[in-house]
Image (tube, coloured by chain):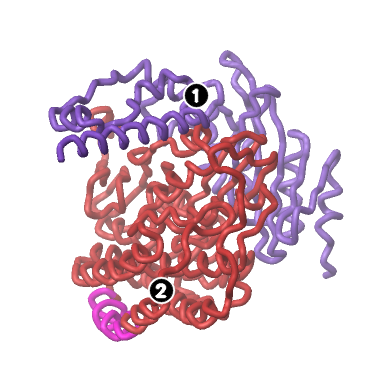
Chain colours: A red, B purple
Amino acid sequence: MRPENYQAVKLGQSNEYEIFIGPNHPGIEGNYAFRLMLDGDIVVSGKADAGYLHRGFEKLMEGRLWIQNLAIVPRICVPDPAPMEVAYSMAVEEIMGIEAPIRAQWIRTMQLELSRVAAHLFTFGGHAATTGMYTPMFWGVADRDLVLDLFEDFTGGRVYSIYNIPGGVRRELPPEFLQKLSNLLDYLESRQNDYDNLLFTNQVFVDRAKGCGALTQEQALELSVTGPNLRACGLAYDVRRDDPYLVYDELEFDIPIQTAGDAYARILVRRDELFQSIRILRQIIERLPSIKGKIRTPIPNPLSWNVRKGEAYARVESSKGELAYYVVSDGGDKPYRVHVRGPSSMHAVQTLEFLAKGARLEDVAQIMFSLDACPPEVDR
Amino acid sequence: MNKVPIDEILNKVNGIKITHKRKTRIRVDVDADSLPTLLELIKGRASYIHLSAITCVDWIADNQFELVYHVWSYEEKCLISAHTRIDRGSESNPAKYVSVYDLFKPADFFERDIFEMYGVTFIGSPRMEKFILTEWNGVPPMLKDFDAEAYVQETFKWTDYNPDWLQELTDQGGGIAVKPEDIRTAGNTHNMSTHRERDKAKAAAVKANEKMQGWKQ
């Protein structure tokens, strides 16, 4: 809602007062607003106010060709766009009854894990900044940039790759790419100590994050919390392992968990996940050269391509949680319906409102960033 | 306790149609009346506790809305998609359905979203109000009979963009090969012929440009 359309609440005789955070505020991730009712500096109630990033993607997709939608889907979540492309492509493939060649599936897995590394590095910085530490942000963004360089190398796009199409991936990897990737992983691993000293074991940060925004496992399940936020409550659930897609069932990786359920537990889960992603990428570097073959299953001319009647629900594990695409085709050249289930639509609305209640005003920003909420997934 | 197979539980619901799509996906079609019973059964008896999403699909030709409830079980590692159809209603008598908020808390978000985008009122849902489109007063925009492009044409004015530098390029045979308004007036924006026309025009422009350069030399 535009600020001029807000109606101030008249409270009569009360100590409570209303405060708006956002839509442009350093304590809010993206363009999102939060209306808080405060008593002193304790939050009595909070109400999420979305819509600043609503671009009507689901409606737009109904008016565009199947192939054109690939330019739209990654824009739904800026920090972690790769899972969007893959989920959409997987849903269309399921309706078509085709499967991407095995080499394409390995390349997709590599892209997803690289994207997860980039997204987590970004989140460390954002979360640390809400506690007043800005150095991790500079470091995180600088290291993420190195991942983006690799994205540019093999997809052509730094942020929005638009690399996947139904049936496979667009291009073969450039020569020497896996060597570059390996070098980057060496570098990221060498940074582990620095990040630990700067952020994860830093007493200033630990004191602020411990106990902040704690969720029990029951509450998390009731609120449909997924991803690292659920794993921080002690439940080892990961779509990659429990509903395997691509080649995740051939890869070895652990699912890091924490039991405290607070902001500190959440960031520790992300830290461990980053190193699990590096472990997965190392296996991919080892296996990929021996996997030969095509990278695309032929599809009809994309400009006159009618996908047969059907529906599919494709789920992937994005860096934020369970991401799903529900795609319906009526046999036409455009999707009949595309529904995007972003993990943040659960985290940034009900969970955030629930956790903000009773928190102190200065912790609200940290709670939002520790949930790694991505507002465009709410608005779509 | 012996584990009851999921089919046995599902078959307790009247008029159910079960399709096993693959190992982790079950599609279920039920009447609108028995859907809440089904959800209660699979949540209470078969550990399907995670509501992944609720989707609404507007089947305008059948004058129906299809509601799809995607529910996941952490123990069975399986997703049940429960499909049901409700009457599409009309402007004076909007579509209504019963809320499942008391079973699944996240239904609050999804039902509010469907209320806003499709106009389906969920009886018993705690927040049947606007959320994303707080300043929108028109018909629910995701309905198939809401033409977004026509709305844009009526509401916003198109202005010509002809800066000098672009005019110079156009004089040399470059610039915008097909103007947006030509595409719009051609009717269907995304059919094959417009693409071919655009390619043809582009090729012609390139040719003209080459000629021009040749003349310059």
Residue A68: x, y in percent?
A: 48, 41
Residue at the disc numbered 1: B188
Q: Residue furthest top?
A: B92
Q: Is residue A238 visible?
A: no
Residue at horizontal 32 percent and vertical 30 percent from the top: B177
Q: Amino acid at mark 2?
A: Pro
Q: From the image, which quarter does the N terminus of chain B lie in?
A: bottom right
The answer to whether A217 is drawn above or below residue A35 in the figure is below
In the displayed structure, does residue A114 sit left or right of residue A329? left
Residue at horizontal 85 percent and vertical 69 percent from the top: B2
Residue B124: x, y in percent?
A: 59, 35
- Stretch in magenta: A188-205
Q: Is residue A19 visible?
A: yes
Depth check: give the residue in front, B168 or A238.
B168
Q: Amino acid at mark 1?
A: Asn
Q: How would you classify the magenta stretch by its main secondary structure?
A: helix
Residue at the disc numbered 2: A175
Depth check: give the residue in front, B116 or A285.
A285
